[in-house]
């Protein structure tokens, strides 16, 4: 699942490297004398985090005290700007710790994060509920129109004031204590939720020892399973729940009983009644979120979240989902019936189960379009795909990417690239492409440092892209599926949103925008994947060097809307479950599994024990609570935005420059609706997604 990761950090914003503890042996507490002040990963050990974090919290508290105790009247500089710089050390260190915990963790680090999380939350609460500090912020806010602030300064001031209100600054007595206590518990629960999913993901393997039981599986998948078995020192072939293993297995394995075993294992993560069960955590998180929203005067948690989103309120989200559901549902039913009829024509006369759909739909696709997507893999060697994406950003934005092996990385799989625009240094890009047991599933982009300017100096970002792609096997390089190519493009779009940022304040830079807008720069990039002009630049057979055949590209385009209704319904269903949990107006004590089914449009038979919610990291540990609808919301925007590139040329520099100047470089300096309008010259076309998906004849989507 494509995902943008927002680490659990405090509300104040990092700046440059701190000056604390320069002689301390702890590398996290020193100046980083490294290329571009990148983290010295080779020197950082688990035992460094606790002392460094606690020292940084102490330093940040002292900086906040200086702001509140000064006698000078509140100004933008001595209050708002001082707050922006108060937690430099803490933000720098916590960014390293939280990001490494996501992609290269171990049990010791997980415990450290659990131990430190309450301390981080207590500090955050001590800032947001500091009455003297809020009084100074409010004093500046009340005179904002007479201060001659720049547009960015005004936006930072408004955001700072709102963040205090939304974090309980106006609460009194017991309410303030309850809010602080709840937020501390929520921070720990979200981390524990993620750890449980990772544990369940790693806990299951399928070992096959008879070669005939591998029937249907592509050779590269079989070879990877053999290598996995050898790595584990066992016989035969081993399949895991890591997506490069799980996805192809569910799509191609003829052995139905094994597909069922894999499906049940994957879809019971967090729902196994064991020590890593997430059911009670889901109940508790939803209850605490409701209580937090109620304390702040909102009817439910979704209303609290949407107050800072393009959609604005639950009614708008409901209307959006309902109209798109109305458009896609007939196509979804038709898609399922077509697959069922096809399976029956091949002798499979029983009702399709959930572990059957990918298998039979892929066979139908191969026959319908005379096309097997596995034939694409030899043309999508990871290194060539990466270079193709680099070259695309060179054409569009004049960027170059050069690997710098002097930059330390946190795992041998990781590569670090210097990014430049001509002679101008733009930032560092870390690429971490392959699955491992220490990394959670999915794909995401995050930062070790965001772009910002201070004292006339432009501090450039340190961007991280993390994926779980098919690994090299033996002498065969990493060969990506078409879906993985799309995912790479998606996450790269997020990365360049951060990389091309050009703002004053880090709190406004890059991806610090409304969640239902943040997917536009990522999803719009996926459109290039189906354009022959782009594919022909890099899609070369890894052995022969031949360019991808034109008829393959034509088949990609012809099959673009295959199962569009079914897949759209699936995405909408996840959004509906998310909104159902977060529009509760009373503490939730029921069955998570039953609740999910009650708020899902089901086309396939329900399987007892199958539960998406208990592994739904997007909404319970990843920042998308009451926001999963954002993927579809942003698809409307990306479909519309790409029409401008289609009109002017997919490599048109003028269009790209306008997108860079009006969207990518601007971060959260203005409302997303303004940024989009500045690029397109008009409001979004509400029917753009329907047109692209082939649904338009069913219903007109309007917001």
Image: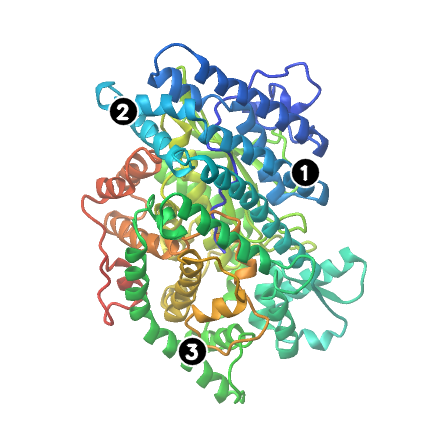
Crowd rating for badge 2 (residues with CA inside 10 Å; few <14, some 14–19, many 20+): few
Reading the image, the residue beneath label 3 is 336
- Which residue is more in the foreground, 623 or 349? 623
Q: In x, y percent, where is residue 88?
A: 51, 23
Badge 3 element: helix
Q: CA distance from mark 2 to mark 1?
A: 41 Å
Quadrant of res 57: top right
Q: In x, y percent, where is residue 426?
A: 44, 29
Reading the image, the residue beneath label 2 is 142
Q: Residue furthest front?
A: 173
Q: CA distance from mark 2 to mark 3?
A: 58 Å
Q: Earlier in the sequence, mark 2 or mark 3?
A: 2
Q: In x, y percent, where is residue 618?
A: 49, 53
In the image, residue 416 above or below residue 684: above
Badge 1 element: helix
Q: Nearer the viewer, mark 3 or mark 1?
A: 1
Instruction: Please state if 219 lies on the left or on the right of 431 as rendered.
Output: right
Marking on residue 112 = 1
């Amino acid at each position: 699942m494509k995902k943008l990761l927002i680490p659990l950090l405090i509300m104040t914003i990092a700046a440059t490297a701190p000056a604390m503890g320069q002689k301390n042996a702890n590398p996290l507490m020193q100046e980083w004398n490294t290329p571009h002040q990148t983290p010295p990963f080779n020197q950082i050990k688990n035992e460094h985090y606790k002392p460094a974090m606690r020292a940084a919290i102490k330093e940040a508290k002292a900086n906040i005290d200086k702001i509140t105790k000064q006698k000078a009247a509140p100004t933008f500089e001595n209050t708002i700007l001082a707050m922006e710089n108060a937690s430099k050390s803490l933000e720098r260190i916590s960014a390293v710790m939280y990001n490494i915990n996501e992609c290269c963790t171990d049990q010791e680090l997980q415990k450290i994060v659990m131990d430190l999380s309450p301390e981080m939350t207590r500090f955050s609460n001590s800032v947001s509920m500091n009455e003297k500090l809020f009084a100074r912020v409010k004093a500046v806010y009340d005179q904002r129109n007479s201060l001659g602030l720049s547009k960015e300064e005004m936006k930072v001031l408004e955001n700072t004031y709102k963040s205090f209100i939304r974090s309980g600054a106006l609460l009194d007595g017991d309410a303030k204590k309850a809010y602080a206590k709840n937020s501390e518990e929520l921070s720990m629960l979200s981390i524990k939720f993620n750890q449980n999913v990772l544990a369940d993901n790693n806990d299951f393997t399928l070992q096959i020892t008879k070669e005939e039981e591998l029937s249907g599986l592509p050779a590269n998948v079989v070879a990877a399973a053999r290598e996995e078995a050898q790595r584990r020192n066992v016989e035969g072939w081993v399949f895991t729940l890591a997506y490069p293993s799980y996805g192809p297995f569910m799509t191609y394995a003829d052995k139905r009983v094994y597909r069922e075993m894999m499906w049940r294992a994957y879809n019971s993560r967090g729902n196994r009644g064991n020590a890593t069960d997430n059911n009670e955590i889901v109940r508790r998180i939803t209850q605490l979120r409701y209580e937090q929203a109620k304390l702040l005067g909102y009817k439910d948690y979704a209303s609290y979240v949407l107050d800072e989103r393009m959609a604005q309120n639950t009614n708008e989200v409901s209307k959006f989902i309902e109209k798109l559901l109305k458009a896609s549902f007939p196509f979804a039913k038709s898609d399922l019936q077509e697959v069922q009829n096809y399976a029956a024509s091949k002798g499979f006369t029983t009702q399709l189960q959930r572990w059957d759909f990918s298998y039979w739909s892929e066979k139908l696709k191969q026959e319908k379009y005379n096309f097997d997507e596995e034939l694409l893999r030899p043309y999508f060697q990871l290194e060539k795909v990466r270079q193709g994406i680099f070259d695309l950003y060179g054409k569009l934005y004049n960027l170059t990417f050069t690997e710098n092996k002097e930059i330390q990385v946190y795992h041998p799989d990781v590569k670090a690239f210097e990014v430049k625009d001509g002679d101008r240094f733009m930032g560092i890009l870390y690429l971490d492409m392959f699955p491992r047991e220490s990394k959670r599933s999915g794909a995401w982009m995050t930062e070790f440092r965001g772009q910002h300017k201070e004292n006339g100096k432009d501090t450039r970002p340190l961007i991280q892209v993390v994926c779980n792609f098919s690994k090299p096997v033996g002498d065969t390089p990493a060969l990506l599926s078409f879906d993985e190519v799309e995912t790479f493009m998606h996450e790269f779009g997020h990365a360049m949103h951060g990389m091309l940022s050009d703002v004053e304040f880090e709190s406004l830079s890059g991806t610090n925008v409304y969640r239902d807008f943040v997917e536009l720069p990522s999803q719009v990039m996926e459109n290039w994947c189906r354009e022959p002009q782009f594919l022909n630049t890099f899609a070369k057979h890894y052995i022969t060097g031949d360019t991808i055949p034109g008829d393959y590209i034509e088949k990609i385009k012809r099959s673009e809307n295959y199962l569009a209704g079914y897949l759209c319904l699936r995405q909408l269903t996840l959004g509906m479950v998310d909104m159902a949990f977060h529009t509760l107006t009373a503490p939730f004590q029921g069955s998570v599994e039953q609740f999910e089914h009650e708020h899902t449009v089901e086309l396939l038979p329900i399987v007892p024990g199958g539960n998406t919610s208990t592994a739904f990291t997007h909404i319970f540990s990843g920042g998308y609570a009451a926001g999963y609808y954002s993927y579809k919301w942003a698809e409307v925007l990306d479909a519309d935005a790409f029409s401008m590139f289609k009109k002017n040329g997919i490599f048109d520099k003028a269009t790209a420059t306008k997108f860079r100047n009006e969207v990518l470089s601007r971060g959260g300096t203005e409302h997303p609706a303004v940024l989009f309008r500045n690029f397109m010259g008009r409001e979004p076309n509400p029917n753009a997604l329907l047109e692209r998906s082939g649904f338009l004849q069913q219903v007109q989507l309007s917001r």
